[in-house]
Image: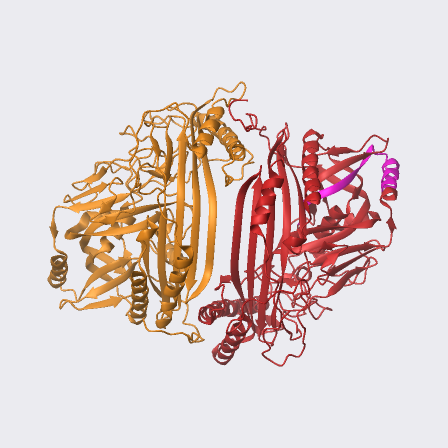
Amino acid sequence: MSALAWLAPPSLLIWGLLAGVPTKAPAQTATPLVDILASELERNFGALKAKADPPPYFLAYAVTESEAESVSASLGSLNSRNRNQRRTLDVTVRVGTPQLDNYRRVRGDLPRFTGGAAITLDDSPDAIKRRLWSETDRVYRLASQRLLNVKTNQQVQVETKDDSGDFSTADKIVSVSAVPLLKFKGDDWQAKLRKWSADFGNKPGILSASITVVAQRESKTFVNTEGTKLQHGRTFARLIFGAQAKAADGMDLSSSEILDAEDANRLPDEKIVKATMAKVERDLISLLQAPVVEPFVGPAILSGRASGVFFHEIFGHRIEGHRQKDESEGQTFAKSVGTRILPEFLSVTFDATKRSLDGTDLNGWYEFDDEGVKARPVTIVDQGILRGFLLSRSPLTGFASSNGHGRRQPGQEVVPRQSNLIVSSSNKVSSDALRALLLAEVKKQNKPYGLYFEKVDSGYTTTGRRGLQAFTVIPQIVYRIYADGRPDELVRGADIVGTPLAAFAKIAATSDKTEIFNGVCGAESGNVPVSATSPAIFVSEVEIQKKERSQDRPPILPAPTVTGGRP
Amino acid sequence: MKPLLALLLGPLLLAPLLKAQSADPILRVLTSEMERSRGLRIAGGADIPYYFEYSIDDIRSYTVNATLGGVIDENRNRLRVPQVRVRVGDYAFDNSNFVLSDGNFAARYDTGLLPQDDNPLALRQQLWLMTDRTFKNALESIGRKRAAMRSVTAAPEPLPDFWKAAPVKLNVNSTAQALDEAAWKKRVVAASARFSAFPAVLTSSVELESIVNTSYFVNSEGTELKYPDNIHYIRVKASGLAPDGSTIRDHRVFHAIDAQRLPTDAELNKAVDEVGRHVVQLAAAPLGDIYAGPILFEGVAGGQLIGELLGSQLNLPRRPVGNAGQNSRFTASDLEGRLGSRILPSAFTLVDDPTQSEFRGQPLLGSYAVDGEGVVPKPVTVIENGVFKTPLLSRQPIPGFTASNGRGRLPGSYGHRLAVMSNLFVKSIETVSAEDLKKRLLDLVKQRNKPYGILVRQMDYPSSAGGDELRRLAVSLGNSANGTVLSSPLLAYRIYPDGKEELIRGVRFRGLNLRSLKDILLASIDLYQFDFIGNRGPFSLMGIGGYVYPASVVSPALLFEDLEIERPAVEVPPPPIVPPPALSTAQAP
């Protein structure tokens, strides 16, 4: 841990919170990046305030240094090995007033000013200052032009219901800490992946399989004209196992597992890796033989990981703050604060400060958000009652300040995004008891079977008014649980579909064990790392539909063999 | 991904088709997987494959990009890019030359890249999946093509779909020395720092890219190739702002097939200083006025003009079979229908010759031993005494010709490769010395009572325009009645009757196109070599990804009696409110 620079008397001091392994700071340069940013920020802000019309009232510079290394292998052979390093600059200029500025959304459009310019990888003051200056000029022009458009639009539009303004106040924070270096043993990983992949997916019916390891480091440097100066960041690592196959009827099938950790050295050992590969293969081969699902409405259990994705999609995206004041949004919960929106045994929090849970690293962890606001735990639903929203510095009526969820991928504009979603329950039963509840419900509804969603790939949801207020969750592994005691049966080709309010009302109970889904979420402000933690949930009714599928047949010739030649 | 064809330093080995297995492990994998694929059939289906082609570009690349002494980007890449082609039917009628010939109908399981180890099983697994998908796509295309042909009138001329070509064997190992990356990085960074000495230069970069490629190719006709295909280049770019807020810029590019022939430090530094000086001069230069009169393209500018106007048009791609009433995105050559017509004054003859490896001791960039289809190229007299005689051809049949002349260098459309130029030699029998040519320009100026003539020393081709500038340009081109998209002059001068020159900025040609070439008045006896890396983007814009072709034009300076320049109505943002930051490390060049 080292504090590199203290430039101004800070009003709020936070020492670097990056516990982890203290590593040596990057070579100290004559002028650290945070100082280069701060001095050019001051110069540009001063000159623009004095000479520009309209003058800006706020400026911020954010530089994200991302470094990534990856190795991928199939059938014992190296597919690729890459290393990337990049520094991206995002410039924010606000003109007008906090009440009405160039970021005001008009007819649902999300303005974009930043271009994500590349700057030098080393702290070369001349090159970086030049770029800061030219980007500030470019962004200022766009911002002032947009303010004019916004003001014109204000005159012709009816008044909107939310009069909360465009930019809230935030504490000034000065915190400069060294981000752990990326320690990735590429040669070791290359040898390991060659070895592990040699036999992975080399089974009849499996068309392709690969193992990929990715290690990443993100260091964020942020300054704004309120005096905030930050340098913070983290590392990420993941091991990805994927395999693909094609069923005899042409349906494309895949099976995958992803193991996440904060650092490549914390990724699981060979024993877990081998078990994971075996599971991916076993699932895919079972899917090849599994019957195709029929459209079905009935009771189901979602595993903890499946439920995590379910909550992320159908709930999480709907409590992102900007959707509550955008007139083009469905605003499912905009007027529901203080009312019951989930069963009373459920609570939902978002906690970006949690680095790990039960020994598993959480992907949605960060120290400060992308507007320089300190992360904090936020209770969104307390015993079924909606208490608030995820907020950036764009305020909402009744919610005057950010709760540290303004996030973006470098090169995009900030909007409120999810962090670590955690579902907790006070109606917990054992896994066996949950299964018994399912079977009882199956009998009650007079169905032949219920469904168990073990693993989901992904999901998506539409929140706009123009589209349906609907969601789709795409499961990988789904079982039929029969009422008559037949063994559970794997099925393929199912998508869960539904509408959010109806879906929440059907949650009846949860298990007493939670599971974690780590992933990357894509939305308006790009891709951001997130996680979702949930117990398994029992729902009295879900609807599944048949997946769209490809029509072409599996490969005509058999797979090649080591000896080659005609089979 | 830049599969490039390049000069072969070794001897070209033409051998009869041999049954013996290749010694090279990669070629052996390609051949054996190709042999196995011959068994591809769909039970009950009538269409069977008659031609297979497998190629791999095994690429190692290194890029470093620096500005004002700092590295912006440094990348090393290793890629093995495979391509598989399968033709079903026969040479007379197959799945190509149809609007959907390049369609993807089958699900994809291959990754698009081959494994980097020489592991036969892992390599064959990918090739197997690619072949299967390509075969299914070919079946789908030929079926749809037959259906489409029922609803359109039959093609006027009975043309085959694919020309046969003689098998070629070639096995050349690279002898090139590896680029010293660390040393080059230092050089590039140091060169980029020199721009600090030019305060008018607001953005600048020095970028090195080195691509070392081994190309592998086999087809079912017996062609088997392995050869090095390398290219290295350094781009020096700088731009600034004129007092009215418009962008001004200059660039200089060095190319080398052999890394040892990249510029020395002194040459590189000289180029940086020259580009820097040009930007300073352009920032102070007056805006050009509308002009109609004689224009002289001096030095390489003549070759740039010919390369841009003719380089990608000397082919005559064939119109695909379409679905009745549906528009295809086919782009015809500007020379379509002009075979046998006069394109240039009768004094001019143009020969495209990839078999020449150097010109007066300078390596030529467009030299190669085999094209992308494994065809050995021959010199082609494309324009003889001003008349368009022979187009550049790939294996796509067109009327009046019977075989490829080995110019299939770029991936094309409708199941075929696109023919492009290589080394284009522009010759004229009516020439005067460069000095006399300039005198001739001034005579014309005086005769026509013009206050000055125009001299172009450098065109912006390939263009170094940035994103913002290009967007503004696109808007202004959209607004202009002038449909021709020709790059603008980077260095243009007014030349007064007394010989005084004055640099101008912000001008563009009006109505200068392929047809204008007929009006070339006179050429210089001196010849200038212009090397470039062409691509299919607008103005062969530098750094546009995808496939490229290295090429050279050897041309005289060219004098036109009557051309027009205009000042384009490009909307220019006002100059920045905040002055640029002062530089801490100014040094004298």
Q: Taking B300 as reference, is B167 left or right? A: right
Residue at x-position 19% and y-position 55%: B562
Q: Is residue B568 visible?
A: yes
Chain identifier, colour orange: B
- Image position, residue A374 (x, y; %): 68, 68
Would you identify the image quadrant in which residue B192 lies? bottom left
In the displayed structure, A318 sits above or below B82; it is: below
In the displayed structure, A308 sits above or below A373; it is: above
Q: Taking B331 as reference, is B106 left or right? A: right
Residue B395 lies in the magenta-colored region: no
Q: Nearer the viewer, residue A222 or B225?
A: B225
Q: Is residue A55 visible?
A: no
Q: Taking A202 as reference, is B407 left or right? A: left
- Image position, residue B509 (x, y; %): 27, 57
Q: Nearer the viewer, residue B436 or B182?
A: B182
Q: Residue furthest top?
A: B44
The quarter of the rendered structure image containing the N terminus of chain A is bottom right
Magenta residues (range): A435-461
Chain identifier, colour red: A
Residue A443 lies in the magenta-colored region: yes
The number of numbered discs placed on residues in the rendered structure image is 0
Q: Taking A334 as reference, is B213 left or right? A: left
- Image position, residue B244 (x, y; %): 36, 71
Q: Nearer the viewer, residue A319 or B43?
A: B43
Would you identify the image quadrant in which residue A450 lies? top right
- Image position, residue A265 (x, y; %): 65, 54
Would you identify the image quadrant in which residue B315 lies? top left
Q: How is the image coloured?
A: by chain
Residue at x-position 54% and y-position 28%: A560
In the displayed structure, A246 sits above or below A338; it is: above
